[in-house]
Image (cartoon, coloured by chain):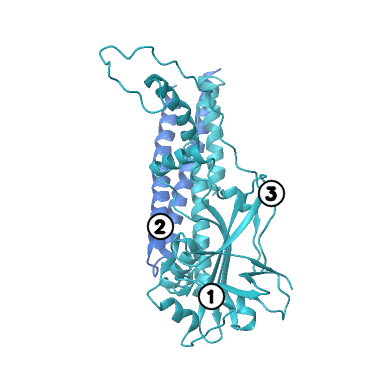
Chain colours: A blue, B cyan
């Protein structure tokens, strides 16, 4: 197992993490936009349930994107130092 | 921009490759991507949103200006439609005030049909929020009382319109399905039912799987699509071992009296073991008989009256283990508010 092979895999993982982070950010943005369009004149328990689901998914997307960016940075730092 | 599912899959592959190169070929087996449930949850949200869109459409809404996929309708009608989609008849039974049921069923008329009529007491609150009186119709033909038709030819007399005495009914809503007809028992009720089943055998009633084998067609008697499995018998229990009673009373307790029928306290303790085993097994099956197939029809008459025909079908087993169906009309909110149905053969 060579260090070059590990470094190449780390770079590939960093690229994939970056791509996934971008998609998650896009999904979070789309969810918020769709919810804002769909719900201006809608009230009641189903509206509350909808809002809660959207908020929970947005939170997962935003937190996941942040964690992936941290992972990407650490992977690239490791490649640079090895 | 790749799809979320594609991006997660690509990230997964990259992490597994990195893990195998840096920590050995088995390292990827320990990697579980925590983001995998996310696409499924977004799909679930999409389905929910699609149902809301259906609700808008059902409520008479139209697409907004500009060709966007935004529909507009009054908010109460949307919540109402969504409530109707989850409506279950057993949860909407209510009692009526004195005289209210008769006024709702017969209107201002004073009627006496003698060999035909309705039984009932309570009301069913429909998905539209209206109260429908629950009725169990009956007619007497050749000294036999019938409560429903098992097939009726067009133009022939029907039990449901009392052989023509009370016609003009139109079904405005109908739903068939499987329902739990009582709340799930508490832990204590399960144990008590388990002890009861120890003495009386397995609980009698329909399981969810039993009633899913029922074919319910409006205007016909129910029948089986496939024969349900008979209920399991009592579980095997260890053979009882009764230690012999001591020859003398215990030390320092010369006056001890053993319980009636027991020659030894130790023997009584041993007797409890199989009872507990059977009791636990009975408790586990205490809720199996709580399901029924149902067919509920909400009807309106040309003269403005409304009514609900709420039929429940249970699965039982005869002494030979053969499945049998029994049908009742639900006529009120109490457990005993029901009328056993006798089906009239097709004339």
Residue B232 placement (x, y as % from top left): 60, 39
Q: CA distance from mark 2 to mark 3?
A: 41 Å
Q: Specify few, some or many for label 3: CA neighbours under 10 Å numbering under 14, 14-19, or 20 or more.
A: few
In the rendering, which numbered label is found on residue B227?
3
In the rendering, which numbered label is found on residue B246?
none
Question: With B227 as the anchor, is A42 left or right in this view?
Answer: left
**Does dot 3 land on a helix, a strand or a loop?**
loop
Viewer-closest of A17 and A52? A52
Marks 2 & 3, CB-CB < 8 Å contact: no
Q: Point out the tag, 3 or 1, that comes first from the N-terminus.
A: 1
Residue B344 placement (x, y as % from top left): 67, 69
The residue carrying mark 2 is: A49
Q: Specify few, some or many for label 2: CA neighbours under 10 Å numbering under 14, 14-19, or 20 or more.
A: few
The residue carrying mark 1 is: B118
Q: Chain of mark 1?
A: B
Question: With B318 as the anchor, is B92 left or right in this view?
Answer: left
* Quarter of the picture holding the C terminus of chain B: bottom right
Q: CA distance from mark 1 to mark 2?
A: 43 Å
Q: Nearer the viewer, mark 2 or mark 3?
A: 3
**Does dot 1 land on a helix, a strand or a loop?**
strand
């Amino acid at each position: 197992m060579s260090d070059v092979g590990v470094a190449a895999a780390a770079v590939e993982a960093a690229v994939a993490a970056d791509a996934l982070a971008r998609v998650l950010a896009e999904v979070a943005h789309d969810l918020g936009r769709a919810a804002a369009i769909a719900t201006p004149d809608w009230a009641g328990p189903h509206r509350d349930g909808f809002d809660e689901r959207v908020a929970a998914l947005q939170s997962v997307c935003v937190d996941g994107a942040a964690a992936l960016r941290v992972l990407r940075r650490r992977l690239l730092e490791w490649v640079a130092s090895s | 921009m790749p799809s979320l599912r594609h991006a997660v899959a690509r990230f997964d592959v990259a992490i597994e490759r990195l893990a195998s190169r840096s920590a050995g070929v088995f390292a990827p087996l320990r990697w579980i991507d925590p983001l995998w449930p996310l696409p499924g949850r977004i799909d679930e949200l999409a389905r929910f949103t699609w149902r809301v869109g259906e609700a808008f459409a059902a409520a008479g809404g139209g697409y907004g200006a500009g060709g966007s996929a935004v529909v507009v309708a009054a908010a109460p009608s949307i919540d109402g439609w969504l409530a109707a989609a989850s409506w279950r008849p057993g949860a909407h039974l209510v009692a009526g005030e004195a005289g209210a049921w008769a006024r709702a069923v017969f209107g201002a008329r004073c009627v006496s049909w003698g060999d035909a009529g309705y039984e009932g007491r309570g009301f069913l609150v429909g998905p539209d929020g209206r109260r429908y009186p629950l009725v169990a119709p009956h007619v007497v033909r050749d000294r036999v009382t019938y409560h429903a038709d098992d097939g009726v030819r067009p133009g022939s007399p029907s039990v449901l319109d009392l052989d023509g005495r009370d016609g003009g009914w139109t079904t405005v809503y109908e739903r068939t399905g499987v329902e739990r007809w009582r709340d799930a028992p508490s832990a204590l009720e399960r144990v008590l039912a388990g002890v009861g089943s120890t003495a009386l055998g397995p609980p009698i009633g329909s399981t969810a799987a039993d009633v899913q084998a029922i074919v319910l067609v409006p205007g016909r008697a129910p029948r089986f699509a496939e024969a349900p499995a008979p209920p399991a018998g009592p579980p095997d229990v260890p053979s009882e071992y009764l230690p012999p009673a001591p020859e003398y009373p215990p030390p320092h307790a010369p006056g001890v009296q053993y319980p009636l029928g027991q020659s030894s306290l130790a023997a009584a303790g041993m007797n409890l073991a199989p009872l507990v085993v059977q009791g636990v097994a009975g408790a586990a099956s205490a809720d199996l008989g709580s399901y029924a197939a149902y067919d509920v029809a909400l009807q309106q008459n040309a003269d403005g009256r409304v009514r609900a025909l709420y039929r429940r079908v249970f699965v039982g087993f005869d002494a030979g283990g053969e499945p049998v169906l029994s049908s009742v009309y639900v006529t009120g909110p109490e457990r005993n508010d029901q009328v056993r149905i006798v089906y009239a053969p097709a004339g």
